[in-house]
């Protein structure tokens, strides 16, 4: 076998390997997109069923469902507390009037923005 034949075989093998890698990458991207689409559709199902589960119109004895409902209730309480705290801060700001915002940089550094 001549050197030229070896070079052709090597180039052909490298080309085939590159094509396989490209196909693999395409399939991995496609799989990732399909998995993402499946998660979106499962989320839609959950959002559609959640109100019925919360109200008791649909009951489930699955431990995972009960745990998720309890976690959602706890998160809802935390969100309510967060919202109340935010509203209180807004009310305090309204009571104090339109105060000038506190600058992020000391007065000397505000002009250049880079501290020089």
Image (spheres, rainbow, N blue to C red):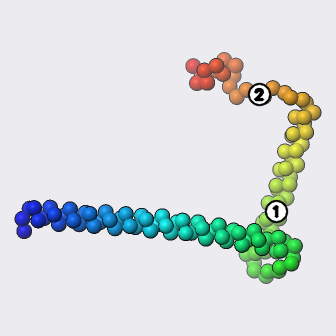
The residue pinned by badge 1 equals 74
Dot 1: within a 10 Å radius of its alpha carbon, few (fewer than 14), some, or many (20 or more) residues? few
**In-image side of 113 versus 46 (left or right):** left
Q: Residue 44 falls in which quadrant of the image?
A: bottom right
Where residue 42 appears, as percent x and y from the top left, is 67, 71
Where residue 83 appears, as percent x and y from the top left, is 85, 50
Task: Give the residue displayed 85% in from the left and 58% down from the top.
Answer: 77
Task: Give the residue displayed 79% in from the left and 60% down from the top.
Answer: 75
Q: Residue furthest top?
A: 108
Asked whether residue 35 is in view, the answer is yes
Task: Give the residue displayed 82% in from the left and 80% down from the top.
Answer: 59
Please tell me which residue lies in front, 108 or 3.
Answer: 3
Residue 60, numbered label: none
The residue pinned by badge 2 equals 102
Asked whether residue 67 is in view, the answer is no
Label 1 element class = helix
Where residue 55 appears, as percent x and y from the top left, is 87, 73
Q: Residue 79 falls in which quadrant of the image?
A: bottom right
Q: Residue furthest left?
A: 2
């Amino acid at each position: 076998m001549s050197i030229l034949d070896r070079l052709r075989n090597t180039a052909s093998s490298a080309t085939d390997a590159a094509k396989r890698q490209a196909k693999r990458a395409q399939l991995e991207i496609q799989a990732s997109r399909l998995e993402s689409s499946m998660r979106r559709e499962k989320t839609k199902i959950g959002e559609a069923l959640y109100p019925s589960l919360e109200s008791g119109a649909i009951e489930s004895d699955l431990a995972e469902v009960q745990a998720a409902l309890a976690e959602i209730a706890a998160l809802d309480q935390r969100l309510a507390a967060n919202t109340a705290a935010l509203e209180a801060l807004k009310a305090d700001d309204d009571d104090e009037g339109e105060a000038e915002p506190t600058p992020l940089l000391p007065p000397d550094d505000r002009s250049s923005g880079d501290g020089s």
